[in-house]
Image (spheres, grey):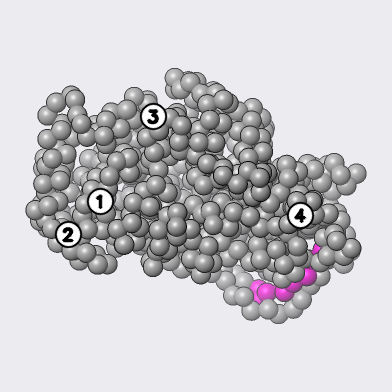
Amino acid sequence: MSSFQPDVIVVGAGLAGLVTTHELARVGKRVLVLDQENRANLGGQAFWSLGGLFLVDSPEQRRMGIKDSRELALHDWLGSAEFDRLDDEDVWARRWAEAYVDFAATEKRDYLRDLGLRLLPLVGWAERGAGSATGHGNSVPRFHLTWGTGPEVVRVFAEPVQAAETEDLVRFAFRHQVDEILVEEGAAVGVRGSVLAESTAERGVKSSREPVGEFEHRAAAVVVTSGGIGHNHELIRRNWPTKRLGPAPDHLISGVPAHVDGRMLQISEDAGARLVNRDRIWAYTEGIHNWDPIWPDHAIRIIPGPSSLWLDATGRRLPAPNFPGFDSLGTMRAILATGHDYSWFVLTQTVIEKEFALSGSEQNPDITGKDVKFLLKARLAKGAPEPVEKFKQHGEDFVVADTVESLVEGMNGLSRGPVIDAADLEREIAARDQELDNSFSKDLQLMAVNNARRSRTDRFLRVAKPHKFLDPDNGPLIAVRLNILTRKTLGGLQTNLDSQVLRPDGSAYPGLYAAGEVAGFGGGGVHGYNALEGTFLGGCIFSGRAAGRALARDLD
């Protein structure tokens, strides 16, 4: 390594780190990329993602008859973000939000397409909102799914970076854990840390933290792209916004690997960087324990259609508009307000076959493998997709039964507290079913289902035709215990629009940059309080690109 003198050190070989490195290498800058994991983990969390991308007024939307615009998207973003610290912690986050929506409405699709990324022609409708035109939620479908999911998003940046590695413009130093940012005369000039014992662990598997050596590397700039705190349950609970969401869950499961530990946030703050909005998190309420785990407490999120009945731990139906797929954190508040940290979906075989999707590239082998025949067979054939069916058969959170009484017996066997009354649940389901006797309804969830089916994607692929749950022809009945799943850090290191880290006094920190989740996906919290989905990969790409391009310009 002594013969390689980098212009820039990038800390973290995830998506944001790859994008930053790509932008630097393509103009001839020399980059040293450090990561505490082995090469098998190149791409980090992005590899495990579904590959969703937030785009505005795209050709895919227009072909689906969806009318979108930059103005509508920004309206939705700001209504969801609810920036309320605009004189302080949100001042740059708001600017990043405007810049990111502009990117999503203009350059983003072509930028990725030029790298070889392709999208499925169908557009999904995520985070449908809290029932207000001015509040949280997407007014229209904007969730574009990558053909190849997360591994493909990683590939289109990893391949040019690996090509630059063969030209000796890029060096990787895996199993290098940064413990300190070197600062001289107020500027970041390098990093110091521990060389960890070699690891042959497969991607995502927890690895050793045994140190076997030390290192120190210097460069004109350091870019921190190390991710968030998603597997650090202690830190999550310490930062949990109790007043806003309710008490921190006792039972948490992890939607990200163990290496997502948040170490670099504290290390950067110790070096004089400003960390903001640390109380903002993005956790999901639809988590299930993975029956075939890769990392500790491995969780998978159900990405639901809108038809399942959502019950709290006591068996009461959650109040409107807490419907599946509508308002993640609003539903979190309703669940935790009960004093319990889990809830239930109750549905039918008809619903699970059409409406259940699972997060994660490994749970969608047809799309991940870019296999058209497999995709058509898996998504259009009778029955649930195979990964969903396997969870139904083997997952510890699933109950399948022919009657409400036997369903409730199984639910009570999985309860972490309350006992559900079968007669009460049957009355609740029967009341909902009765609303289907007419084309009109006072049930807001059924209204939402009918609205969803106006979207071509939802009608044909994602939302089941309304039907009576107690009709045996639609059975068996299914209940799913839903747990709180950790995922994203919405706050982070405050940065300007060049991804340069700021100091507590608001001044730019010479030589120190940050991109991706560690920077709150830009500005220390571009999402504010709520994400519109499809914005995490895009945030890593946009902020990593900003860092790389700013350094390419300023280091000339």
Q: Which residues are magenta?
A: 189-198
In the picture, measured across the screen, residue 3 lies left or right of residue 516, that is right
Give the side of residue 164 with respect to residue 412, left or right: right
Secondary-structure class at tag 4: loop
Please say whether residue 193 is one of the residues in the magenta stretch: yes
Residue type at tag 4: Asp
Q: CA distance from mark 3 to mark 4?
A: 48 Å
Of labels 1 and 3, the one closer to you: 1
- Going 38% across and 52% down the picture, which residue do you hit? 332
Label 2 – label 1 distance at C-alpha: 10 Å
Whether tag 2 and tag 1 are in contact, CB under 8 A, the answer is yes
Q: Give the residue pinned by disc 2.
A: 420
What residue does disc 3 label? 457
Q: Amino acid at mark 1?
A: Leu
User: Residue drawn 37% across and 25% down?
Assistant: 456
Q: From the image, give the main secondary structure of the stretch colored magenta.
A: strand
Q: Earlier in the sequence, mark 2 or mark 1?
A: 1
Q: Residues within 10 Å of mark 1 (few under 14, many from 20)?
A: many
Instruction: Say whether disc 3 or disc 2 marks the residue closer to the N-terminus.
Output: 2
